[in-house]
Image (spheres, rainbow, N blue to C red):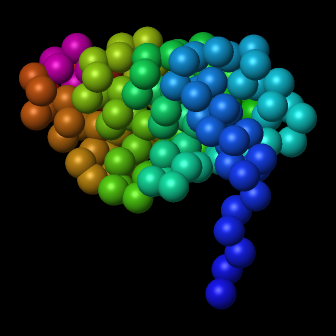
Amino acid sequence: MSEAPDPEVVELATKIFDLARQGRTEELVAYVDAGVPADLTNDRGDSLVMLAAYHGHADAVRALLARGADADRVNDRGQTPLAGAAFKGETEVTRALLEAGADPAAGTPSAVDTARMFARTDLLELFGAQ
């Protein structure tokens, strides 16, 4: 039998996930620099990088990656931050993830498959796929 999570911890985690969604890079990395894991995930397996990438915050993505976050960490649905960026058409985020070594073929659907699905030819070019 597991204990219920501490409400203060849940509140803090919620705040940190919101910082990633909002692209509030300075505040977000202050928490990571203070000890919050760069690969912290929410109850759906979405990492801080996934949330920042999906919401189009390239600076936050770069800062998290520079602090050791995994560019290819999949969420509970098998999606990667790169596939999320491809879905949203976030070119600058895509570039940041690729520069950090993200794999366009990782995940389900992969970033390549996602770009093809939504006819994002500019991203397919970045992935070296057509």
For image coordinates 33% across by 56% down, the residue present is: 77
Q: Quadrant of the C terminus?
A: top left
Query: Which image quadrant for residue 69?
Result: top right
In front: 48, or 12? 12
Residue 104 placement: quadrant? top left
Query: Where is residue 57 shown, x and y percent of the image?
Result: 51, 16
Q: Is residue 85 left or right of residue 60?
A: left
Q: Position of residue 89 (x, y in %)?
A: 28, 18
Q: Residue furthest right?
A: 34
State the residue at coordinates (20%, 29%). Answer: 115
Residue 99 in the figure: left or right of residue 33: left
Say if the magenta span includes residue 122. yes
Q: Is residue 106 above or below residue 62?
A: below
> In this rendering, is residue 25 above or below 43?
above
First to last magenta residue range: 120-124
> Was residue 110 drawn as part of the magenta stretch in this picture?
no
Relative depth, front residue between 108 and 57? 57
